[in-house]
Image (cartoon, rainbow, N blue to C red):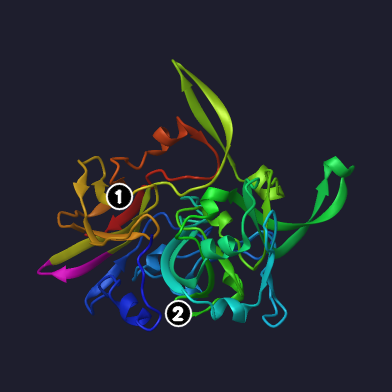
Amino acid sequence: MGTVCSRRSFLACAAGMSLPALAADEELVAFGDYGSDFRVAAQADKPFVKCFDLRQLTSAITPSREFFAFHQTQTVSANADTWRLRIGGLVKRPAEFSLADLRNRAGRRDLEVIIECSGNSGDPRIMNGLVSNAVWTGVSLRPILEECGIDPAAREVVFLGLDAEQDRKWEAGNAEFISPHGWSIFVQDAMASPNLLAFAMNGEPLASEHGFPLRLILPGWYGMAHIKWLSRIEVTDRRYEGRHMARNYQSLRALQSGEESLWLDTSISRNNLKSVIARVTRRRAGPGFQYRVTGVAWGGPAAIRMVEVKVDDESWRPSVIQRPGSGAAWSLWSFDWNDATPGRHTLVSRAFNARGEVQPTREELRARLLSNREDNSQWPRSVIIDP
């Protein structure tokens, strides 16, 4: 589970998660790898893409207005008075909830969870900016499903949002149908205790951009599973093969058989172990400067144990975990670069988790995965130190 903060103490809690603020004599050191291709407002629609500028990282909690967003179509503006969450399919007691019903349920809780788009990468247009961390407020999914009574024949739980698009169905002679955006998971995954039906974010009601009135939060899963504008939950006895789930969110993974590799099409599901360098700062120290490298680390099935930093071709050196996260929230780390020298340098980080897994290089990743998604490879950064 992620770190839990009560709603009333959210601001105090968030303040305790901050990185040191820039001092009067401290300044950001410019990266040499940000170009004109990178924009926070990356794309207007189909899909709508807004990035989080990692250089603005000052707290474990990403401000809601800076939180990244990715919509397959456009932002949905829902009417809270008429909106309903409907639960049906293979359940003994179908149910319907208004937003007030959910807000007034017992057991509401806060959960800190990172969300990363599966397409997040060091691409110059994105700069690993399709990831953010927030505190989500809502009610647990499991008790609601238990109240509905899941049929023993059920295999999957399908979550559908209000966003939809026209889709040609070849099995219907290429006729067009309205296709809602959705995602499905196995029943046992849906019943995991951390899963949340969220109606607030960072202590405030959800904005339309982030899924108002209700968003599914599945800690540890990539962003495509965190369905925004959630309006329907359908329990089924067969696989859901929605447009994006069945066709777009796929990766090729290598299955080793002796010295040969068999490449299998596989679905995208859970986050992978990853760290990124977010910013470099400097402050005056005698005749020169002191430099600090700061970043975040997250993902994988176990907590972050360590992050190391490498400068150019030197040996790996340990960073300091300033604020540990968990499998559901990211960790903040920093590295005091005390021997920085003038010139252009390449900095890179790698994360280790409690299971002993290590964030791969790009070459190591490509030996076992071929995809334009799930890129958790080490991300070299370029900085120029002035004389």
The x, y position of residue 327, in whole percent, is: 37, 54
The residue pinned by badge 2 equals 203
Q: Residue at x 62, y 78 (%)?
A: 99
Q: Which mark is residue 347?
A: 1
Answer whether residue 118 is visible to the viewer in this image: no
Q: Residue at x 28, y 50 (%)?
A: 345
Q: Which mark is residue 360?
A: none
Tell me the kind of residue under disc 1: Leu
The image shows residue 63, relative to residue 36, as above or below, that is below
Q: Which residues are magenta?
A: 281-287
Residue 323 in the figure: left or right of residue 160: left
Residue sitting at the far left: 286
How packed mark 2 is, by other alpha carbons closer than 10 Å (few <14, some 14-19, many 20 or more), is many
Front residue of this view, candidates 373 and 134: 134
Q: CA distance from mark 1 to mark 2?
A: 36 Å
- Badge 1 vs badge 2, beta-carbon distance below 8 Å: no
The x, y position of residue 56, in whole percent, is: 39, 69
